[in-house]
Amino acid sequence: MPDDLEREVRDLARRVAHLEQLLKVGHALACPEQPLPPANPHPLPETTALLPVLGRALLGLAGAYLLRALTETGTFAPQAGVAIGLLYALLWLVWAARTPAAHRIETALRSLTSVLVLAPLLWEATLRFHAISTWTAGAILLLFTVFGLAVSWRKDLLVVATITTLAGLGTAAGLLMATHDVLPFTFVFLATAAAVEASACLDHWLSERWLAATAADLSVLLATWLVTNARGLPEAYAPIPYSWLLASQVLLLAIYLTSTIIRTLFRGFTFTAFETAQCALAFLIGVGGGLRLSNQSSAIGALALACAAACYVVSFALLDRHGSHGRNFYTYSTFGILLALAGSRILLSGAAASAVWLALAISCIWAGGFFGRLTLQVHGAVYLLLALVSSSALEQAGDFLLGEATWPGEKPAAIGAAALAAAVCYLLAARHRRAERGTWSLQAFRLVVAGALVWLAAGIAAGALTTAYHALYGAGASHAYCATLHTGVLAAAALLLAWAGSRWNLLELSRLIYPVMIAGAYRLVVEDLHQDRKAALFLSLLLYGAALMALPRLHRAGD
């Protein structure tokens, strides 16, 4: 019986609670003009909330001026005043880092207060009171910058890192120009760049990299120019020992090479535009400055070749394993060919470098065809073209073909070796033909190699025929028939290209017909039409016109 009574009481209480809830809902529906208060109100912050923050910042500056006054009156020694000021500025940085991440304006104001405390203090202590040396000022600036990066790391406070980096770099730049002491602040820039790059390797402060890199590049460039310019180091500047300057150039290159290798190879990040441009600049500044600074060209050239070999190994042994060519592959391979060209040109003279490039062209085209690496074949074409240009082989062939030069010309060995190398390169390219005939880069590679061979062969043929003509009819024979011979060589070359291109299905040879015929038309207009022998002009027009008529037939016959 008591159990039944207890059960009824509980049921009655449950019903009463349900009725009360219904009454509350009904009242709310009946009185919509009285909305229910929000459960979690979030009032917007008032503008006046910033006033205490500004007040605290002004009090911080007041403390800095008090410290300056105590130092000027002799209460504190200058060195002690600098130490206390540095500690005071670092405390403001810590306060900024401990501010909640959502309060960005407050964080920025406290960081700026820290900068406004330290920068004027160092400026006056270095320039006015001469209480500290430039090296000490640089060390303090570096400590301040690195400390700012460190305290902002945990909460990823970009505003603190940016303000301290800008302050450190800007103050160092101002002191460099004011004191005319380049080395201390150059090493500040380099150390700051190293700290920023170390953070970038851990995927922090990526947007700060260009600030430190620009400062480091410009400072090393300035120091190099001051030492190596024709007038020498200006009297107003502090001495810059060669060994220290060379160390700064090596450090600049080492910092960005190390960072890029760690990020792209070990961390798996893709090359950024900054890394590509900065590595190129670091190489130019380091290698170019080293060449201007010392006579150790052999060591610098060997370093460039070693880096080129490393880039090729990374490209084709590490990044090309699965056949997927991303930005890292092309960037490393491009650095490889550029460094190989620079290193060989530093170590060797013009003729020797051209010979090495011809050998590299043959090697790359063979290796690219054998292992199925189009990038190596393209590099081989680049080596070939540069060798032909640097040895003047292309220019000499042009003189034979479009001018009045006769064999053997000025450099017969150079044009002969170039023609032989071009022939070997084209034979290798034609032997290792790949299936993807529609690939534009593959077609462009074959077109370049075939075009170089045709140009050199036609030039040698024109020079040899001109020499034979004068050998038969004397040195005083009319040059009008030489022009006819040159036009005939171009017409014959076009016919041969049409036949060979159709016969063996060599698309690159067929495409060369048009530029060859355009060169023939140029000869007709510029040279042949102005000759005094009309019989020679008749023969030139006859040969060119016959070639125009025969080209379509040859093409169809080959098909």
Image: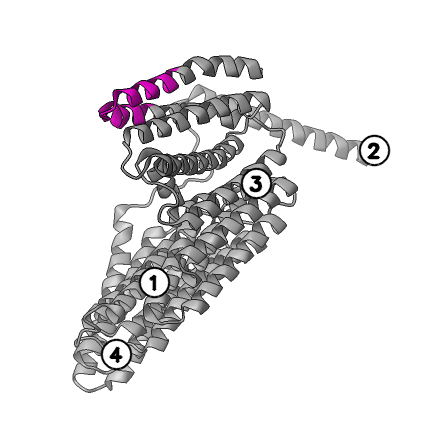
Which tag is nearer the camera, tag 3 or tag 2? 3
Which percent across, then down, holds residue 416? 46, 45
**Residue 531 belongs to magenta span:** yes
Which element carries disc 3, helix, strand or loop? loop
Q: Residue at label 2?
A: 1
Judged left or right of residue 17, residue 334 is: left
Which element carries disc 4, helix, strand or loop? loop
Q: CA distance from mark 1 to mark 4?
A: 19 Å
Q: Which numbered circle lies on residue 325?
A: 3
Magenta residues span 521-545
Q: CA distance from mark 3 to mark 2?
A: 87 Å
Which percent across, then down, holds residue 283? 41, 59
Q: Earlier in the sequence, mark 1 or mark 2?
A: 2
Q: Residue at x 51, y 56 (%)?
A: 308
Callout 2 crowding tier (Cα within 10 Å): few <14, some 14–19, many ≥20: few
Is residue 91 depicted above or below 102 in this figure?
A: below
Callout 3 crowding tier (Cα within 10 Å): few <14, some 14–19, many ≥20: some
Q: Residue at label 1?
A: 216
Q: Which numbered circle lies on residue 239?
A: 4
Q: Mark 1 is on which residue type?
A: Ala
Query: Foreground: 49 or 469?
Result: 469
Residue 154 visible to the viewer: no
Is residue 178 depicted above or below 379 in this figure?
A: below
Is residue 447 depicted above or below 308 in this figure?
A: above
Q: CA distance from mark 4 to mark 3?
A: 49 Å
Q: Earlier in the sequence, mark 3 or mark 2?
A: 2
Which percent across, then down, holds residue 114? 30, 65
